[in-house]
Image: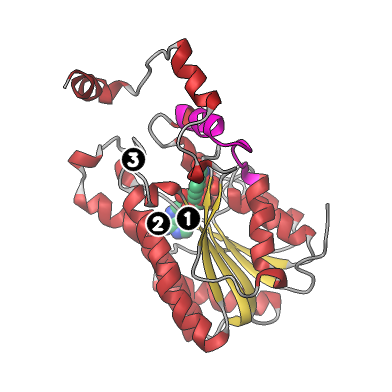
Amino acid sequence: MKYNLLKGKRGLIFGALNEKSIAWKVAERAYEEGAQVALTNTPVSMRLGNINELAKKLNTIVIPADATKIEDLENLVQKSMEHLGGQLDFVLHSIGMSPNVRKGKTYDDLDYAYLQQTLDISAISFHKMLQVCRKADAISRWGSVVALSYIAAQRTLYGYNDMADAKAMLESIARSFGYIYGREKRIRINTVSQSPTLTTAGSGIMGFDNLVDFADRMSPLGNADAEDCASYVITLFSDLTRKVTMQNLFHDGGYSSMGMSFRAMKVYNEGLEYRDVKDDKTKQQKEIES
Ligand SMILES: NC(=O)c1ccc[n+]([C@@H]2O[C@H](COP(=O)([O-])OP(=O)(O)OC[C@H]3O[C@@H](n4cnc5c(N)ncnc54)[C@H](O)[C@@H]3O)[C@@H](O)[C@H]2O)c1
């Protein structure tokens, strides 16, 4: 259903890789709600995915940028303002990648050069984006910035690896920059902590299917999918949430407040067939035996 919540607003959306991406759904919903959006992703992701199709559909452009590179971000912010015809009213940071996760390095055997990349891509890029926007005065008064997070920032979830550290840092940046940008220009900055969602980034996490199933059984409302997430983010971009800032907002069907649910407990009663990623099996067996 359309509500015209973003009528006349301009936004910049990072991280739409393909139609499964959360950013893709947010861009579609923002357009549907009356906003004009500019899209961005890395040149490699632009080739690997199909962001150009989304741009066509939303009658807009894709500006290539690696969110870890200041020069790219400066160019992106200028070009998006030129294309949209003014300051940005909202920005979505929907970026995450861990080379340690990709290469199967476990948390007790991290490659530290990879860790630096995980933090740079998944968290520090948020700071870089905010700092570049502020220096260029690119976000309008009462603008809204959202980054996507995950509950692994607060709780330990098997297999989430160094992305947990990146998410903790991401949420902290939202608070620290939220203070500065809020005090100066009433710009609000929040993170949305989303249910596990079937996307390219999500599927890279060890045991992801089990995690999705477990979270769904634990959540009274069931997991929130990418479309649900997009609808929630739209409310945060709208003028209806002008006094919400520096928050990490759980969007997870109730998961974050649960301890144990009947549906999850039932699985244990029936017995779980144990399945795990091959590489980590020996280590897991030792943990069970100890
Ligand atoms: N899928 C989930 O289960 C889940 C749950 C909670 C939060 N999130 C978060 O949602 C966000 C979006 O992920 P998604 O699930 O839609 O997956 P996705 O793979 O579709 O999106 C990740 C995006 O990050 C982009 N990216 C990677 N490195 C980049 C760089 N250097 N510069 C610019 N962009 C870069 C990728 O090109 C891709 O578009 C991430 O922050 C992710 O951690 C995902």
| Residue 271, percent from left and from top | 43, 12
Q: Spatial distance from mark 3 to mark 1, Cα to Cα?
A: 15 Å
Model colouring: secondary structure
Question: Could you tell me which residue is drawn at 36 percent across and 57 percent down?
Answer: 168
Taking depth in this image into account, of 240 and 34 the one nearest to the observer is: 240
What is the distance, in whole Å, between disc 2 and disc 3 at their CAs?
Answer: 13 Å
**Marks 1 and 2 in Cβ contact (< 8 Å):** yes
Mark 1 C-beta closer than 8 Å to ligand 1: yes
**Residue 78 visible in this rendered orientation of the protein:** yes
On whether ligand 1 comes within 8 Å of the CB at mark 2, the answer is yes
What amino acid is found at the position of numbered circle 2 in the picture? Ser
> Which residue type carries mark 1?
Ile
Q: Position of residue 180 (x, y in %)?
A: 45, 82
Q: Residue 95 carries which label?
A: 1
Identified at 32% across, 53% down, the residue is 165
User: Which quadrant is home to the C terminus?
Assistant: top left
Q: Quadrant of residue 242?
A: bottom right
- Whether residue 44 can be seen here: no
What residue does disc 3 label? 101
Q: Which of marks 1 and 2 is nearer the N terminus?
A: 1
Segment tinted magenta in the rendering: 210-226
Q: Is residue 105 above or below residue 30?
A: above
State the SS at label 1.
loop
Q: What distance separates the C-alpha of mark 1 from that of mark 2?
A: 6 Å
In this picture, residue 22 sits left or right of residue 136: right
Question: Mark 2 — residue?
Answer: 122
- Tell me, for residue 146, which label it has, or none: none
> Within 10 angstroms of label 3, few (less than 14), some, or many (20 or more) residues?
many
Q: Is residue 102 left or right of residue 199?
A: left
